[in-house]
Image (cartoon, rainbow, N blue to C red):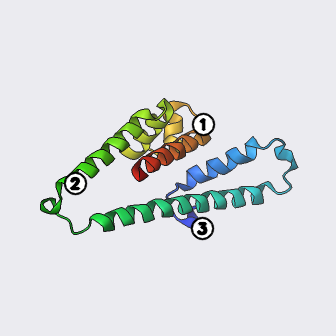
Amino acid sequence: MRKAFGSGPPEPEDVAQAAFERLAALEDPGRVRNPKAFLLVTARNIVYDHKRRSGRHFEYARTVLAEYSGQSLDDLSPERLLIEKQRFQNIRAAVESLPYKQKVVLRLHRELGYTYKKIAEETGWSYGDVYRQMEYALAALSGALKR
């Protein structure tokens, strides 16, 4: 994975683990004719999915930055400040309303820089669960930003 896609993100070790988890989660893993090919294709798809999602987040961030570029604090009107205050409150409320697992995963990953693998080790949750919880949390926060 590292040779094909670089050192991340996503972390090559995390991708490999997720691919093995998907193989193990199959109803009958023994029916897979070529497990190596299955793992390689699955890992590749995980990386592509991550890059696709990251691209959407990057595009959104770029549009937000473009919207605010060139504005100094002196240029902000009372209306703009009120809008931004409401937006911040929406995000804060969205974070507060996240389920416990999503809050933990979000904090460990975004604030402390833990990888999904390290979060799984620290919490005892599966890698797949950590991955899903982060996706759900980001979707909730993205929705709050669009309001």
Marks 3, 1: nearer the viewer: 1
Question: Left or right: 145 with respect to 120?
Answer: left
Q: Earlier in the sequence, mark 3 or mark 1?
A: 3
| Three-letter code, disc 3 | Ala
10 Å crowding of disc 1: few (<14), some (14-19), many (20+): some
**Gap in angstroms between the C-alphas marked 2 and 3:** 49 Å
Helix or strand or loop: what does disc 2 sit on?
Answer: helix
Query: Visible in this render: residue 43?
Result: yes
Q: Relative to 136, is 80 above or below?
A: below
Q: Is residue 75 left or right of residue 127?
A: left
Q: Are marks 3 and 1 in contact (CB under 8 Å)?
A: no
Q: Is residue 117 above or below residue 146?
A: above
**Residue occupying the point 54% across, 40% down:** 133
Q: Describe residue 147's horizontal placement relative to residue 83 as left or right.
A: right
Q: Residue at horizontal 54%, vertical 37%? A: 120
Determine the residue located farthest toward the left in the rendered image: 74
What label does residue 114 carry, if any? none
**Badge number at residue 79:** 2
Quarter of the picture containing the N terminus is bottom right
In the image, what residue type sits under mark 1?
Ser
Q: Is residue 128 above or below residue 37?
A: above
Q: What percent of the width, then of the height, locates residue 139?
A: 50, 48
Where residue 4 sits, quadrant-wise, is bottom right
Q: Write down the residue under mark 1.
A: 126
Question: The residue under label 2 is which amino acid type?
Answer: Glu
Q: Find residue 71 and report its image quarter.
A: bottom left
Judged from the image, the secondary structure of the residue bearing numbered disc 1 is: loop
- Residue 4's disc is 3
Crowding at mark 2 (Cα within 10 Å: few <14, some 14-19, many 20+)? few
Residue 108, image x, y percentages: 42, 40
Residue at the spot 69% in from the left edge and 57% down from the top edge: 42
